[in-house]
Amino acid sequence: MSKEKPMNPGQQRRKSAKARPPEWADGLKRLYDSVLDEPLPDTFAQLLDKLDDQSHG
C-alpha cells in the first residue's frame, strides 16, 4: 500500500517545468506560420479599401 497522500479533488498534479509539447504542436505551428506568411489577395485588399472609404465619408 502506498503512503502517498491522496490528491484533493480540486488539486492537479504539477507538470515538470521541462514538459515537451505534443508532437502535433510543431506541425500546427508551422501551418499557422505559413498562413501568416501568405500575401493578402488583391480582391480582398480592394474590398477592405471600399469598406474603409464608405466608413469615412
Image: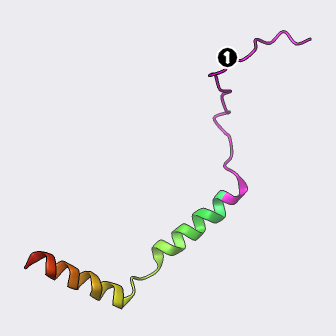
Q: Secondary structure at mark 1?
A: loop
Can you tell which quarter of the image residue 54 is in? bottom left
Q: Can you name the residue that lies furthest to the right here?
A: 1
In the image, taking residue 49 as reference, residue 37 lies left or right, namely right
Q: Quadrant of residue 7?
A: top right
Is residue 12 found inside the magenta-colored segment of the image? yes
Q: Is residue 25 above or below residue 21?
A: below
Amino acid on which disc 1 is placed: Asn
Q: Residues within 10 Å of mark 1 (few under 14, many from 20)?
A: few
Q: Quadrant of the N terminus?
A: top right
**Is the stretch drawn in magenta largely helix, strand or loop?**
loop
Which quadrant would residue 2 be assigned to in this image?
top right
Residue under the point 59% across and 67% down: 30
Residue 38 percent across, percent down from the top left? 46, 80
The stretch of residues the image draws in magenta is 1-24
Q: Position of residue 12 (x, y in %)?
A: 65, 26
Depth order, front residue of 13/37: 13
Classify residue 57 as left or right of residue 22.
left
* Residue at screen point 39% across, 87% down: 41
Check disc 1 and report the residue beneath it: 8
Whether residue 8 sits left or right of residue 47 in the image: it is right
